[in-house]
Amino acid sequence: MLNDTTIETFKASLRGELIQRSDERYDEGRKLWNGMFDRRPALIARCAGTADVIRAVNFARDNRLLAAVRGGGHSFPGHSVCDGGLVIDLSPMKAVRVDPAARTARAQAGAKWIDFDHETQAFGLATTGGTASDTGIAGLTLGGGLGWLSSKYGLTVDNLISADVVTADGRFLTASATENQDLFWGLRGGGGNFGVVTSFEYQLHAVGPTILGGMVVYPLTKAKEVLRFYREFGKAAPDELTIYALFFNPPDSDTAVALVCCYCGPLDKGEEVIRPLRSFGPPLQDMLGPMPYAAQQCLTDAGFPAGSYYYTKADFLADLTDEAIEVFAEYTATKPSPEVDPVWWRVKGFRSSQTWAAG
């Protein structure tokens, strides 16, 4: 139990806000993108900067409080909030600074990809940044990070140059390939709970502002043919093309299968690359064409509204076999809800390409 004096002392030490259960902003402050989680923390520290994060980490440790760290709040498993503890809320920390000459960007951990892309696209630059603009940069990066540029530029974490971290003992460290290398290794997949990352430095690439993107949609009756085509087409596609196959329910319509792509190379070559997507049978809709990269980043936003109840499972497949295609097609035809959407995408840049399946 925390007494009022302890809480008031902590509150006075922060430049940002401290929200308690009696505060009218409490319910909004604890709300997550995934509506499945309804947790009630004791305190929410809305950090204005790194100094606030250090004080919050020290306060949680000294008072033996469970701590949850919130960046974009887009965590599928609800890790961004806890019951009875302290939420270290980084969402006010959204600054993004771009160095166009070095092709790098330093972004605070509360930024979302819509914030990041807004700044980097002013210079025709980007890095692998998820498939929904509302996703926070922090969770995606520390989780690996698939996105529309993965086939060409790897995972988000592959583009991480350095990270500023407040460790569990309240120290502020910078982790990179040349400084605190073990911590840098840990942040890039070696484990978790090393501390709170307050900012990320990324390598940027020349992308946009216009790319070839969008989707081509086919009826569910063509699902097996589309997935077999996707399998063979994806194997031969150039690295500049990232392509996903997904099942979804358009508004007021039956389930359909779509091939969604982003080509980040020269536009004149891209038209030739994506031509087979148009020529494979008569589509229900052809929405492929030149578009702003920032618009591509928002392409799936409508399918993931805040507050819905989300549950996901995933696995890697060595290949999208005929047997797997049969199972996926059968499941999708009998899925229990229109909101259940299996997704597949092929990721290059490793020893071999792999197919990632989520549903």
Image (cartoon, rainbow, N blue to C red):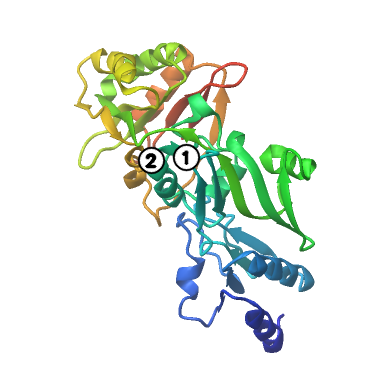
Mark linked to residue 192:
none
Q: Where is residue 75 in the image (x, y as percent from the top left)?
A: 53, 51
Q: Where is residue 59 in the image (x, y as percent from the top left)?
A: 73, 72
Position of 63 relative to 196 (above/below): below
Dots 2 and 1: beta carbons under 8 Å?
yes
Which residue carries the number 2 mark? 297
Q: Earlier in the sequence, mark 2 or mark 1?
A: 1
Residue at far bottom of view: 5
Q: Nearer the viewer, residue 270 or 221?
A: 270
Q: What residue type is labelled 1?
A: Gly
**Label 1 crowd bin: few (<14), some (14–19), many (20+), radius 10 Å:** many
Residue at point 36%, 51% (across, down):
305
Q: Where is residue 43 in the image (x, y as percent from the top left)?
A: 61, 74
Which residue carries the number 1 mark? 130
Q: Which of 114 and 233 is in front in this view?
A: 114
On-image quarter of the N terminus? bottom right
How far apart marks 2 and 1 lie (CA) works out to 8 Å
